[in-house]
Amino acid sequence: MTDFSSLLIPDRGQPGHVVHLVRADGFDAWLTAQTERVRAAAAAARFTAKPGTFALIPGNKADEWSAALGMPDTPGPWDLAPAVAKLPEGHYRLSDPTPGAAALGWLLAHHRFDRYKQGEPVPQRVLLTGDPARIDETVALAAAVAMVRDLVDTPANDMGPAELQGAVEDLANAHGASTRTIRGATLESDYPMIAAVGRAAVAARAPRLIELDWGDLAHPRIAIVGKGVCFDTGGLDIKPSSGMRMMKKDMGGAAHALALADLIMRRRLPVRLHLLIPAVENAIAGDAMRPGDILASRKGLSVEITNTDAEGRLILGDALTKAAEGEAGVKPELILDFATLTGAARVALGPDLPALLANDDSLADALLAAGEAVADPLWRLPLWAPYREMMKSDVADLNNAPDGGFAGTITAALFLEKFVPADQPWAHLDTFAWMPSAKPGRPKGGEALGLRAAWAMLSARYLAA
């Protein structure tokens, strides 16, 4: 794991090269104020102050050079990242001494998933900041995003249910939390949908429900749930090879939930945290669940299986039921779940926008506002009541995947809604957890989408209380 804390440090006047942040509307004035030599260097680099454009600026001595970076009017978290790849190792300060949100991209531009591939060491570009009060949170955010990326990028042979359990236990040990894992006969009796989805996997990759508890009992209780399908073949409704290629990322919801839990504990949010990760492999074997099977659930509802590839909602249903039960009579103030749940969400919104569905308008509004504030946008879709008709079954209380292919993201969320009490504030984030192509500070592969929005909402709600 990258040591982000060494890359963002207080500016105490130590030596460092200046990075001039130049906006397009101030470019002419900036250029006029420079020497002819600097103007020539800017012209040679075709520097126009357009966001992302970059130029090295010579000084009077060999070690007195600086750099210029084009910036938008309102810098976001990724606007410093283009400069990082072009700067040599060293210490840097910005012409604006407070990098604000853009410090996150500076840090994450250093992150590499290098568990399996040898490469050159990443040059360390240290940013000197005039806003030391924001260092700890920025470092924590960078570490959380990197956690999501690393967990999602790890292939399924090294990230099965047992390894996901180990990641939760490592997190608990780091923060003084407690964990419990339910497997075997107890899982079959108490969480039958989780058990059914994962029962075709080999014994070493057996299904389980992993829970973590942390915090003061006197603080408000919240529950975070993450879909942990460590690999998804589609079951007997098998995916084509093209659809199976990236299914190592089907535990991306669990990765987001783990990273959010890390932020909550690292930043000492005054809450009583309950993290739940149903971890399974949706494999194919003689005892795999079949289309037409009817499953029991922890909630007591019976579910007809109309598609074995709609398995994520099954394991989430049991986990959401447990989350809503609370502890010692204390129900959670809110439940958030993260899941790489439907391809329909990607068809509708593309890879960048997680779909948000919620049964509570104030919770949804807070998440949307937080996402906009931290440039981690969400897009709300409705829990459209008339579509509940699609969930009906002739032989069970509901089916897991309506025929017809309409409104797949909404009907999946409506299925989950069946396992959450009507008076329980709950929000569901259907996230892609993946970058299809690289952008500055965001390599191709696993990505945190919706994580920072959720953290901003929670920190505003509980740290400001």
Image: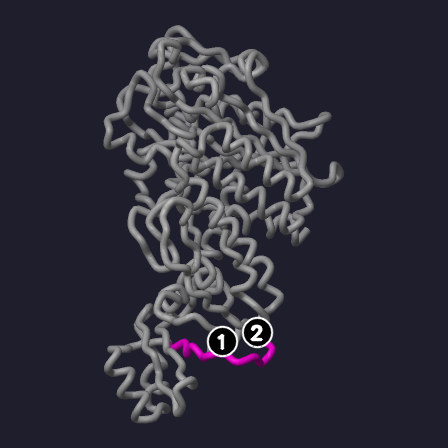
The stretch in magenta equals: 11-22
**Which sits in the foreground, 4 or 121?**
121
The quadrant where residue 36 appears: bottom left
The residue labelled by disc 1 is: 93
**Which sits in the foreground, 48 or 152?**
152
Residue 63 x, y percent position in the rendering: 42, 84
- Residue at (50, 70) in percent of width and height: 127
Residue 144 x, y percent position in the rendering: 52, 49
* Residue 19, magenta (yes or no): yes
Position of 55 relative to 225 (above/below):
below
Seen from this angle, which residue lies furthest right? 218
Residue 247 x, y percent position in the rendering: 34, 32
Q: Is residue 292 left or right of residue 100?
A: left
Residue 212 x, y percent position in the rendering: 62, 33
Q: Are marks 1 and 2 in contact (CB under 8 Å)?
A: yes
Position of 304 relative to 418 (above/below):
above
The residue labelled by disc 2 is: 130
The colour scheme used to paint the residues is one colour
Label 1 vs label 2, nearer the camera: 1
**At numbered mark 1, what does the secondary structure look like: helix, strand or loop?**
strand
Q: Amino acid at mark 2?
A: Gly
* Residue 417 seen by the camera: no
- Residue at (64, 31) in percent of width and height: 179
* Residue 130, magenta (yes or no): no
Position of 125 relative to 282 (above/below):
below
- Residue at (29, 27) in percent of width and height: 406
Q: Amino acid at mark 1?
A: Arg
